[in-house]
Amino acid sequence: MWAAWYERQGAASDVLKVGELPDPTPAQGEVRVRLSRSGVNTGDVKKRAGWLGSAMPYPQVVPHSDGAGVIDAVGAGADGARVGQRVWVWGAQSCRAFGTAAEAVTIPERLAVALPDGVSDDVGATLGIPGITAHRAVFGDGPVDAQVVLVHGVLGGVGSFAAQLARWGGATVIGSVRRGGDLGALPGVDHIVALDDPDVAAKVREIAPEGVDRIVEVALSANIELDAELVRSGAVIAAYASPEPPTLPFWPLLFANVTLRLLGSDDFPATAQDAATRDLSVAAADGALAARIAPAYALDDIAAAHVAVENGSHDCPVVIAVGATSRGLSGG
């Protein structure tokens, strides 16, 4: 099979290789998915780069945890009736050596989730880390029906799914962007505010005079002072990223009885992961999830895809057409 891998950490162009690897064989309880798309997430590029001094977990790593394709083989104990089923894949390279940057991957059966009819492989390949993280950020502390949810970074993969899931769950959704401008309508977003607006707190308070019930936070260190101004008593701030270690405005958060939830997607409880995969599939089938996705990269161009994610070149998820070369994309 055609695949990408690295055997040492470093810059994408220095360490990523593309070539032939043997087709994997599903073990006990596993399925093999013939992939059409592989999702590229921030965590994938950080692992490859050795972020925070992380070491190579295996001698050879095929990167990426998310993808979409069709089950074409099963191991002993897995459901043989699933052969031929379209699925979306998550967690493929979480504590495992071989992920979805390949034409096929073997994974435990629960990591291959039925992809609803009418949902593209491109969208399916973005549901894993972004979707499960968004679900945990929105619903990790209970339902959001009739609440006001502020989603920072609403143009990004996690932020966009969080807004749509919150709306699907019955919330009024405020989405923040870094800079103002005419963005038009955004999926799941009732109100848009710009963080470069000098009166952004006042703008949010016009929408939610009593404060917001939940904040989905992509830049905790940058936004925590603003967040402390906007929360109502008993609010939740669910943070999945921060550009720097944050310094907390402790007393304002304490007096507001705020819950600060920190989200590490690889370490969510299995019950939370399973609830997320069920809800994401239902929401996608309901037409409640739309995804803005960058034009697919060919597998030959995986280094360029990694650099694009590192540099923030796209304000939307990045996917790779794993069966394609730089001479022409195919599939999905």
Image (tube, grey):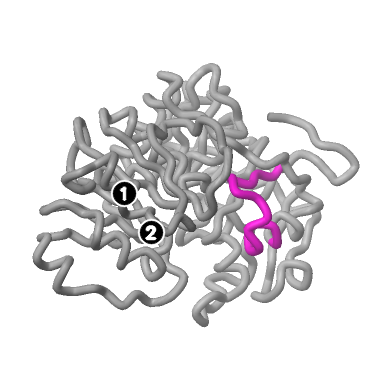
Q: Residue at the spot x=86%, y=46% of the render?
A: 326
Q: Which numbered disc, 2 or 1, marks the residue that appears first in the sequence? A: 1
Q: Is 129 displayed left or right of 147 in the figure? A: right
Residue 233 shows up from this direction: yes
Q: CA distance from mark 2 to mark 1?
A: 8 Å
Q: Does the segment drawn in magenta span residue 312?
A: yes
Estimate the x, y position of residue 130 in percent, counting from the top left. Answer: 46, 47
CB atoms at circles 2 and 1 under 8 Å apart?
yes
Identify the mark at residue 20; answer none if there is no mark.
none
Numbered circle sitting on residue 137? 1
Residue 180 is left or right of residue 76, and the answer is right
Residue at figure coordinates x 52%, y 61% from the top left: 43
In the image, 239 versus 181, the foreground residue is 181
The answer to whether residue 266 is left or right of residue 253 is right
Identify the amino acid type marked 1: Ala
| Mark 2 element type | loop
Kind of residue sitting beneath label 2: Tyr
232, 56: nearer the viewer: 232
Image quadrant containing the N terminus: top right
Q: Is residue 265 magenta?
A: no
Q: Which residues are magenta?
A: 307-321
Q: Which residue is mark 2?
A: 240
In the image: residue 94, left or right of residue 97: left
On screen, 141 above or below 306?
above
Q: Around disc 1, counting alpha carbons within 10 Å, would you say few (fewer than 14), some (14 to 19), or many (20 or more)? A: many
Spot occupied by residue 151 in the image (x, y as percentages of width and height): 37, 47
Q: Is residue 29 visible?
A: no
User: Quadrant where the C terminus lies?
Assistant: top right
Q: Where residue 83 sits in the image (x, y, percent)? A: 54, 25
